[in-house]
Image (cartoon, rainbow, N blue to C red):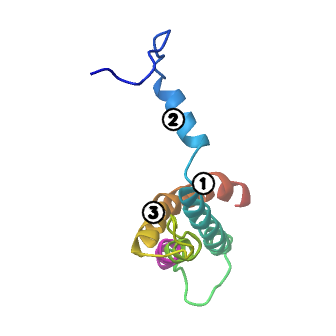
């Protein structure tokens, strides 16, 4: 039995690790890009609110309730996880295939949650290490 595939005239070049990752980055699936963008936007807004509270306390502002930075950080993380999940669930429908109606399932929400976990940490780390020292 013979194969119907054409035989390449030259050997196929194996791509390096970096080249493969760069190609994956450039051609990311649209639902993944939307999940990351929604979680990133929520994390930036909530992170800036946390940063404003932290800078105000550092500068000596007398805020009601005293120093609640730990609670604020907890609310930031929970907010990014919850709102990132919900926003992704709302804006990232599953592929429709032949049907015309877009469907949203718990998998859409799971995609948002899994995108929000590292983004919550990364945005807080960038704000704390790069932005906060310039403001204080």
The total number of labels drawn is: 3
Cα distance, mark 3 to mark 1?
A: 15 Å
Which quadrant, please, contains the N terminus?
A: top left
Residue at 46% x, 70% y is: 108
Measured Cα–Cα span from mark 3 to mark 2 = 21 Å
Give the left or right position of residue 25, taking residue 132 as reference.
left
Decide: is 45 above or below 18: below
Query: Which is more N-terminal, label 2 or label 3?
Result: 2
Q: Viewer-nearest of labels 3 and 1?
A: 3
Pick the residue in front: 102 or 56. 102
Q: Secondary structure at mark 3?
A: helix
Numbered badge on residue 21: 2
Q: Residue furthest right?
A: 135
The circle drawn on residue 126 is 1
Identify the residue at the far left of this view. Answer: 1
Label 3 environment density (alpha carbons within 10 Å; few <14, some 14–19, many ≥20): some
Q: What residue is disc 3 on?
A: 117
Q: Earlier in the sequence, mark 3 or mark 1?
A: 3
| Outermost residue toward the top in this view | 10
Q: CA distance from mark 1 to mark 2?
A: 23 Å
Q: Nearer the viewer, mark 3 or mark 2?
A: 2
Quick one: which residue is furthest to the front in this view? Answer: 1
Residue 90 horizontal/vertical position (percent): 56, 77
Q: Where does the magenta region start and end? A: 70-82
Q: Secondary structure at mark 1?
A: helix
Q: Residue at x 59, y 52 (%)?
A: 129
**Which disc number belongs to residue 2?**
none
Which circle's residue, 1 or 2, is located before the other in the chain? 2
Pointer 2: residues within 10 angstroms few (<14), some, or many (20+)?
Answer: few
Q: Which residue is more in the foreground, 71 or 37?
A: 37
């Amino acid at each position: 039995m013979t194969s119907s595939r054409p035989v390449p005239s030259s050997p196929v070049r194996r791509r390096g690790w970096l080249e493969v990752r760069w190609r994956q980055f450039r051609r990311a699936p649209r639902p993944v890009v939307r999940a990351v963008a929604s979680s990133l936007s929520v994390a930036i807004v909530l992170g800036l609110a946390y940063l404003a509270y932290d800078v105000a306390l550092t500068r000596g502002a007398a805020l009601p309730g005293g120093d609640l930075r730990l609670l604020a950080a907890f609310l930031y993380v929970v907010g990014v996880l919850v709102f990132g999940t919900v926003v992704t669930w709302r804006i990232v429908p599953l592929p429709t295939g032949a049907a015309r109606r877009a469907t949203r399932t718990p998998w859409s929400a799971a995609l948002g949650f899994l995108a929000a976990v590292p983004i919550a940490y990364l945005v807080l780390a960038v704000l704390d290490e790069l932005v906060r020292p310039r403001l204080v």
